[in-house]
Image (cartoon, grey):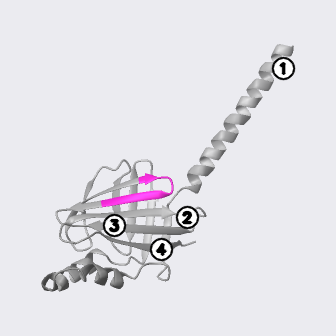
Amino acid sequence: MAMTNFVSTLCLGLLCSAIFHGSSTLAAAQESRLDGTYILDKTDSDNMTEVIEDAVGKLNFLTRDIARERLKKLNPAYRLIAISSSPNAISVTVDNRPPLRAPANGAPVAWIGPDGGKVNASTQLAGRRLAQTFTSADGRRVNDYTLSPDGRTLTMQVTETSPRLPQPITYKQVYRRVS
């Protein structure tokens, strides 16, 4: 009889532990989801005109105007970002552009950039972070999205490198979750 009570108690303890662990894992997975729609908060975001002017200010005056126009096309301040994910794919839509759908494992896909140029794009999701990498003959851009602990603020940190630029361009755009 004592052995039966011990086994029953042990089984009950293991069952409760499994239920508790499973529910906390599920809660953590739901809590870290980036899926949603976000709108630009201009006040907390870097000013794109200033970022671009700072970058072209270091260039030769003969190439400055060309670079300025190209950087404006490549770095629009997206007003709206929508993210959705599944176990196998991640989709990011900015403004009214077609969504970028890419494998969740980081494998690159062909994509058309904001300037109409061809790039290879890859995405990787890890908890509250999503990294998008765009690579072309002209350089590389990384959009590093991070979700705040409360799930209401999405920060996109951009780093752009090119052999044509004297140094990398970095800036941040802050977005608020739309209810």
Say the numbered circle drawn on residue 159.
3
Of mark 4 and mark 1, the one earlier in the sequence is: 1
In front of the other: label 3 or label 1? 3
* Marks 3,1: beta carbons within 8 A: no
Which SS type dominates the magenta stretch? strand
Q: Secondary structure at mark 3?
A: strand
**For residue 179, what is the image quadrant?**
bottom right
Please name the residue shown 67% across and 35% down the image: 18
Determine which residue is flagged by label 1: 5
Q: Secondary structure at mark 2?
A: loop
Q: Secondary structure at mark 1?
A: helix
Of mark 2 and mark 3, the one earlier in the sequence is: 2
Of mark 1 and mark 2, the one earlier in the sequence is: 1
- Amino acid identity at mark 2: Ser
Determine which residue is flagged by label 4: 174
Using the numbered discs, state the Cα–Cα distance from disc 2 to disc 3 in whole angstroms.
Answer: 20 Å
Outermost right residue: 1
